[in-house]
Image: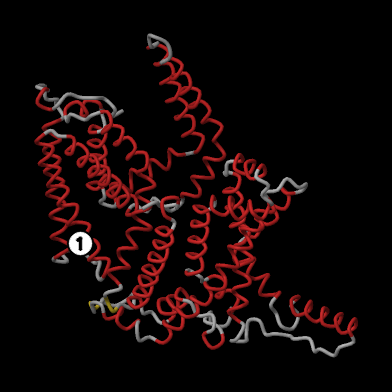
Amino acid sequence: MTTATAAPPSASTDQPGWFVPLLLWRGLTAFLLVVALIGVLVRRGIVLDGPIRWTLIAALVAAVAGGGLAVRWTMQRVHSGRLAGFTIDFLLAVVFGFVALNRMDMFNGLDAVGEAFNGSVAWLGIVVLGWLVSGFADRGEQANANLKQVARWTMIGGLAVLTLSMGLLPGLLEFASRLVATNVLPLAILAIAAGAFARILWSDGAAKLFGTTQSQGETMDGMLFVAPNMLGFLAFFAGPLLVSLFISFTEWDGLTDATFVGFQHYIDLFSDDLFLRSLRNIVVFGAVAIPLAVIPALLLAALLNSKLPGMKFFRAVYFLPSIAGVVGVTLIWKQLFNSTVGYLNFIVLKLTEWFNSIFGSGIEAPQPQWISDDSIALISVIILFIWQQIGFNTVLFLAGMQGIDGTLYEAADIDGANPWHKFRNITVPMLRPTTVFVVATTTILALQLFNEPFILQSPSPPSGPGNSTLTPVVYLYQNAFQEFQIGYASAVAWALFILIFGVTLLYFRRGGDEGVLST
């Protein structure tokens, strides 16, 4: 626990035995970070190159700065030193441990371990029982030490039985042999040391020494709990995002060395006919698809909000397209759009025949080439997008309507307002925050359009006939994975990000004080 409230450092005269080793460790970690930075700069023993190398350099520069500050704050015994040291030690333990396990090839076979665990999971009940007994022993005014001891040994015994049942003993022996044979023992020692010092800094003794307040301690606890998710965010989202930003300023094919070109890619975008065509397509797409995905959803939500019988069934029916798989749904619509055997043209044909038989006319049934005609290919994508999005927007509007105070409608009834007046003067204004959110999310999805044209046009190019379904994301895909112009594709991605961010910010700001994001 780290929630202990401590007196200021000046009030503490006792120095724990681990403080001097902690200072030495802080200096050692700062030195190792500097050595790593120098090694990357001079390429000594480093095989990484291109954007990855420069990203690693930036990360190491930040780590060196943090390590230096951690040394200074630790010597001053302030909470900043505890927080910085804990963060650095935790990250070092994760990084060194991951690298060591990867070099030992320990990640292969994890599926077999999972299957063994599933077959022996019943033995985990012994551990759970010991944990419950331990919690029961802590209840009351005085903790039962003997009962806690029994609970502790019960959990240890349960883990031992679980280990034997899973057959992990041979695996542990193999782990020990690889630890020595692969020369990763120094990395493992550093990972264990970093983890040990992180645990020390998380203790109540460290909280007292560094003058950590209760709120600061709770912040550290929260940071530790969100650390797995934050590490995943940094590794799989923020990190690649920053790398792509750097790549957008380079000429790189993903294989050879990157060449820095500055803002040249962004300048070329303004004269790139294909990119400008993709922007025009997505603007036309958004201008048609967004209103048709929002306005009908609002009207459907108003209908589903009534107390008519069967409304719950229809709510589920309208929401189904939103949870259906995009690939499967798009393949179904591709079959529907088929100009020869598709049901859409078949329905058009039958309706025309019925009309001719009733009115005696000789109208010829139109049989549009939904996907292969450059004049209507984008309309096909719009129809699919609207069908998928209306249900989700309807549920959002319905949730907003059910949050409106019912006394407003009661007052309107007393004043003699009809349903249209109540909808126009109460429902629509009170749904303003929800409307801003729905329009913003629908716009973001529209600007990121990729799956629908890609699957509908397959095996033809996703840009469609005459580039009629070319979107910025499709153009990004073509540059990155077909022409291997990774730098230019990254510039397209960041140009699209700026467009989406600007449009979304505009929506939220226009939402005003009642909007989702007040200003």
**Label 1 packing within 10 angstroms: few (<14), some (14-19), many (20+):** some
Question: Which of these two is toward me, 396 or 428?
Answer: 428
Q: Quadrant of residue 241?
A: bottom left
Q: Where is residue 492 in the image (x, y as percent from the top left)?
A: 37, 75
User: Which colour assignment does the render follow?
Assistant: secondary structure
Q: At 33% from the left edge and 43% from the top edge, which residue is drawn? A: 176
Question: Which of these two is toward me, 435 or 333?
Answer: 435
From the viewer's perspective, tell me whether residue 414 is left or right of residue 151. right
Q: What residue type is labelled 1?
A: Ile
- Locate the N terminus and report the quarter of the image it occupies: top left
Q: Where is residue 8 in the image (x, y as percent from the top left)?
A: 14, 26
Image: 407 above or below 430: above
Going by the picture, which residue comes out furthest to the front? Answer: 415
Q: Position of residue 459 (x, y in %)?
A: 58, 80
Q: Position of residue 136 (x, y in %)?
A: 46, 16
Q: At 66% from the left edge and 49% from the top edge, which residue is drawn? A: 417
Going by the picture, which residue comes out furthest to the top? Answer: 142
Question: Which of these two is toward me, 77 or 305?
Answer: 305
The residue indicated by pointer 1 is: 57
From the viewer's perspective, tell me whether residue 171 is left or right of residue 404. left
Question: Which of these two is toward me, 160 or 220?
Answer: 220
Q: At 53% from the left edge and 42% from the top edge, which residue is drawn? A: 116
Image: 204 above or below 315: above
Q: At 43% from the left edge and 38% from the top edge, which residue is drawn? A: 169
From the viewer's perspective, tell me whether residue 387 is left or right of residue 142. right
Q: In which quarter of the image is residue 58?
A: bottom left
Provide the secondary structure element on which disc 1 rests: helix
